[in-house]
Amino acid sequence: MPDESEYEGGCLCGALRYRSTAPPLRGVICHCSMCRKHSGAPVLALVHFPLQSFRWLKGEPTRYQSSQFAQRGFCSACGSTITMHEEVLRDRVQVALGSLDDPDRVRVDDHVWTQEKISWFEIDDELPRFRQSSTAVPTKASASDDGR
């Protein structure tokens, strides 16, 4: 059982487990089409943990090169969406918020890629919204770099 300063999570079947000994750097809700495809949901909430505080306790996700600059991780046993790894954010691991054992402990900072938001999906909060990437982190993502 992790202590209060640690964050743990994993996949649906338990084949993958991880721990961060540091709090998240940030949390985002992404509305881009690739995150929708990766998660199967209208949005994907991701929490950024510092790489130096993060480790796999059991297994490691299978990675898919979803674009020139990013990989997405999933459990090869149950298919759970687990991680995202971006070239320009090598100092962190982005985990799917829903994979955390206690997602209520983390905050979400903003909505990104709202220009690709599903028309019927209503955002009902006061968080900042960005048509593309947040100004808080660097990116190489663009609408033309969708991996297709």
Image (spheres, grey):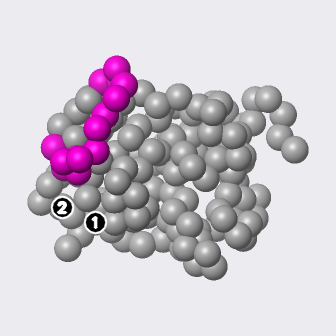
Q: Position of residue 15 (x, y in %)?
A: 72, 70
* 40, above or below 105, in the image: below
* 16, above or below 109, in the image: below
Q: Which is more toward the observer, 66 or 102?
A: 102
* 130, above or below 47, in the image: above
Which disc, if any, is residue 94? none
Q: Which segment did they paint magenta? A: 115-128
Q: Position of residue 76 (x, y in %)?
A: 58, 78
94 lies left or right of 75? left
Which disc, if any, is residue 67? 1
According to the picture, the residue beneath numbered tag 2 turns out to be: 145
Quarter occupied by the C terminus: bottom left
**Residue at (51, 57) in percent of width and height:** 83
Per the image, label 1 sits on a secondary structure element best described as: strand
Q: Position of residue 25 (x, y in %)?
A: 52, 31
Q: Amino acid at mark 1?
A: Ser
Q: Farthest residue toward the left? A: 144
Per the image, label 2 sits on a secondary structure element best described as: loop
User: Do we see residue 70 in this rendering?
Assistant: no
Q: Farthest residue toward the bottom? A: 77
